[in-house]
Image: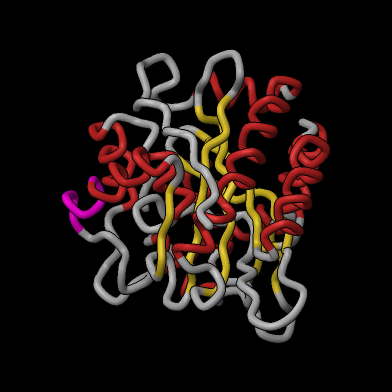
Amino acid sequence: MAGSALDRAFDALELLASHPAGLPLAAVVEALRIPKSAAHRLLALLSARGYVHQDEASGRYRLTTRLASLGFRFLALAGVPDIVQPTLDRLAERTGELVRLGVIDGDRQTWVAKSQGARSGLRYDPDMGAEAPLASTASGQAWLACLTDEQALMLVSRQGFPAPGAHGPNAPRTVRALLERLRAARERGYARVAESSAPGTAAMAATIRHPASRAVVGVVSVAGPLVRLTDARMDELAPAMLAAAAELSDASSSSEFFTAVGRASIGASEPTAPRPRAVRAQH
């Protein structure tokens, strides 16, 4: 990963973010493909700034919580928790499943907030801060369905389709399969997947649009075990999720963060896909 010192610093941070237990210097050298002396200087600088810590016993380098603290501070000052958390909590209580907020940031979607509605039994509860796989998740497909097929495929090409054996057995692995999912999401009014993101799980998602620009600024999703979150159950819960998405859309106008996201969103100044039809609960 040749590049400037700044590029190398970000490469190191992103590498260590995927290894919570830390990595030895040799592993960092191999992953970044830089000389050992350069890697040592880089890690020493990041350690001096408080972003990396070296364990005295093992010599391994790991991230500190400083990056996470910066992220949480930024979201808090932008008012994101105040805007979204009450709505997420109500939807989680209504559905009894995990509810998450994904924020659009350029060509990425990142989960930044959640509320767990499952109080007992099976629980699906992944970590926050992860980038959503666009092709295989309900959150990703909900966003892609609001773009043109060309824009959607451009975004997916950056991440790539899931490799065989990765994600769930129903994850779309071809352009044709993905476009079929996006057409179904547009017709249904929300995205819905089963054993696509991961085996044994299901999820549904709807987009959040800035009320002024109509750009997609986020996605709200409901996810849980497939044994509970069947297709029929998701259709039953869809009106509550869509109502929460509409509530978050209205609230996003009060946040400079969401306004800025809307201006930078892909397709923000271009015609989006037709707005999905309203969904009624099925009994």
Of residues 71 and 279, the one drawn nearer to the viewer in this rendering: 279
The quadrant in which residue 64 appears is bottom right
Asked whether residue 160 is in view, the answer is yes
Note whether 18 is above or below 146 in the view shown. below
List the single residue furthest toward the front. Answer: 283
Residue 92 picture location, percent across and down: 72, 57
Asked whether residue 26 is in view, the answer is no
Question: What residue is rendered at 27% in x and 37% in y?
Answer: 154
Of residues 255 and 185, the one drawn nearer to the viewer in this rendering: 185
Whether the magenta-drawn stretch holds residue 175 is answered as: yes
Note whether 142 is above or below 161 in the view shown. above
Residue 63 picture location, percent across and down: 67, 63
Magenta residues span 174-179
Magenta: main secondary structure equals: helix
Note whether 13 is above or below 270 in the view shown. below
Question: What residue is rendered at 48% in x and 68% in y?
Answer: 230
Residue 8 picture location, percent across and down: 48, 49
Asked if residue 186 lies left or right of residue 178, the reply is right
The quadrant in which residue 52 appears is bottom right
Whether the magenta-drawn stretch holds residue 99 is answered as: no
Question: What residue is rendered at 78% in x and 52% in y?
Answer: 89
